[in-house]
Amino acid sequence: MNRGLLIVLSGPSGVGKGTVCAALRRKLPDLTYSVSATTRAPRAGEKDGVNYFFRTREQFQDMIANDALLEYAEYVGNYYGTPREFVEQTLSEGKDIILEIEVQGAVKVREKFPEGIFVFLLPPSLRELKERITGRGTESQATIDHRLSVAVQEMNLLEHYDYAVVNDEIDTACHRVEAILIAEHCKRERFLHELFEELDRLPLTENVSER
Ligand SMILES: Nc1ncnc2c1ncn2[C@@H]1O[C@H](COP(=O)(O)OP(=O)(O)OP(=O)(O)O)[C@@H](O)[C@H]1O
Ligand SMILES: Nc1nc2c(ncn2[C@@H]2O[C@H](COP(=O)(O)O)[C@@H](O)[C@H]2O)c(=O)[nH]1
């Protein structure tokens, strides 16, 4: 069985990662979502085990010590991390999995899964990014300011990604990511197809089948 694809959707805070990821999951119900662990407090309506695994700092540090995280990062005063076992099991079952994570974590995932597909979501403008972070209304002004200053630094990491997708319209951005997934699947299938054709042409194969 082929391993599934690991897709990392990353980009600056407020660009719309969560929104585009949710739209993509509605369109592609077979795409598995990696639920992260965090020490941040739940926002209104967020549920443990659905949006995040909400953990204390001590619990999170235990996860780090037990090597239970594929990657983790400290972001604007809180820990965020990807539970490792679930990702590895999903991939070994041949299913695609998507991680929606910030950029430091994405760089660490790349070190462990260079074959992953790394997509950087871009805002149509910095002004729009600021409006999105502010408009979401989930953070204090101090946190918004902190996230915005980090966002500008995060944009410089674009060159480390395989693809850049502008999130101007949600549906369009979602289509773009879907197109990337389709293309990546095709690439892998064609690769295998060509490999087997090549093997068929090898004299060694003929000799073996004649015996
Ligand atoms: N294409 C878009 N057009 C207009 N508004 C958008 C678009 N995409 C997302 N938004 C809005 O921008 C805000 C931030 O989106 P979202 O929470 O998905 O960003 P995020 O990148 O996941 O943020 P964070 O990294 O801080 O968790 C939300 O209010 C969302 O509704
Ligand atoms: N490195 C990781 N970053 C993660 C993970 N899960 C979420 N995130 C990112 O953190 C910020 C803040 O998220 P918020 O829910 O507090 O707005 C955002 O960029 C998320 O994508 C993770 O497991 N690892």
Image: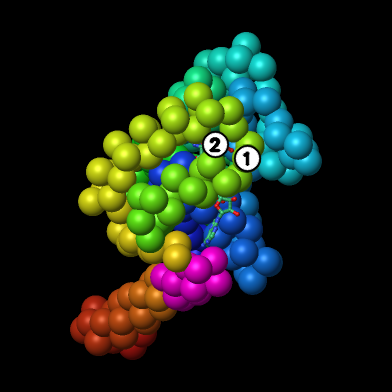
Magenta stretch prevailing secondary structure: helix
- Relative to 47, is 7 on the left or the right? left
- Disc on the earlier residue, 2 or 1: 2
Q: Give the answer, above or below, for where 14 lies relative to 164.
A: above
Q: What residue lies at 68% left-to-right and 25% top-to-bottom?
A: 41
Residue indicated by mark 1: 137
- Relative to 122, is 28 on the left or the right? right
Residue indicated by mark 2: 82
Q: In the rendering, at what x and y percent does residue 204 appear?
A: 24, 79
Q: Residues within 10 Å of mark 2 (few under 14, many from 20)?
A: many
Q: What residue lies at 50% left-to-right and 20% top-to-bottom?
A: 77
Q: Give the answer, above or below, for where 99 lies relative to 59.
A: below
Q: Which residues are magenta?
A: 169-182
For badge 2, the amino acid type reads Thr
Q: In the rendering, at what x and y percent does residue 83 appear?
A: 58, 35
For badge 1, the amino acid type reads Gly
Q: Compute the Cα span from label 2 to label 1.
A: 26 Å
The residue carrying mark 2 has its beta carbon less than 8 Å from ligand 2: yes
- Relative to 36, is 51 on the left or the right? right
Which of the 4 image quadrants contains residue 128? Answer: bottom left
Local secondary structure at mark 2: strand
